[in-house]
Image (spheres, helix red, strand yellow):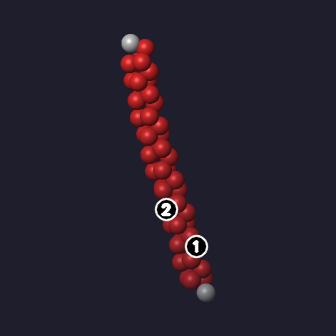
Amino acid sequence: MKKEKEAIKTKENKKAQKKKKKKKKKKKKKKEEEEKDGEEKKEEEEEENQ
């Protein structure tokens, strides 16, 4: 009984960690894309100013 509860708990923890990791990865990717867009806009503005 106790082992079963621990197994279920472990399974839930792993699931939660996986979900957290996925969310973090998604957030990081979004941030990188925003930075890339910002850099491209800067380059376009510099080209227009010249």
Residue found 38% across the figure and 18% down from its top: 4
Taking depth in this image into account, of 1 and 19 the one nearest to the observer is: 1
Residue found 48% across the figure and 50% down from its top: 25
Quadrant in which residue 49 is drawn: bottom right
Local SS, label 2? helix
Residue 34: x and y in percent read 51, 61
| Relative side of 16 to 47, left or right | left
Residue 43: x and y in percent read 57, 77
Residue 13: x and y in percent read 46, 30
Residue 40: x and y in percent read 53, 72
Is 33 above or below relative to 23?
below
Q: Residue furthest top?
A: 1
Whole-Å distance between the Cαs marked 2 and 1? Answer: 14 Å
Amino acid on which disc 1 is placed: Lys
Taking depth in this image into account, of 49 and 37 the one nearest to the observer is: 37
* Callout 2 crowding tier (Cα within 10 Å): few <14, some 14–19, many ≥20: few
Do the numbered discs 2 and 1 sit on residues whose CB atoms are within 8 Å? no
- Among numbered discs 2 and 1, the one appearing first in the sequence: 2
Is 23 above or below relative to 43?
above
Amino acid on which disc 2 is placed: Glu
Local SS, label 1? helix
Q: Which residue is mark 1?
A: 42
* Quadrant of image for the N terminus: top left
Residue found 48% across the figure and 55% down from its top: 30
* Callout 1 crowding tier (Cα within 10 Å): few <14, some 14–19, many ≥20: few
* Quadrant of image for the C terminus: bottom right
| Relative side of 2 to 49, left or right | left
Question: Which label sits on residue 33?
Answer: 2
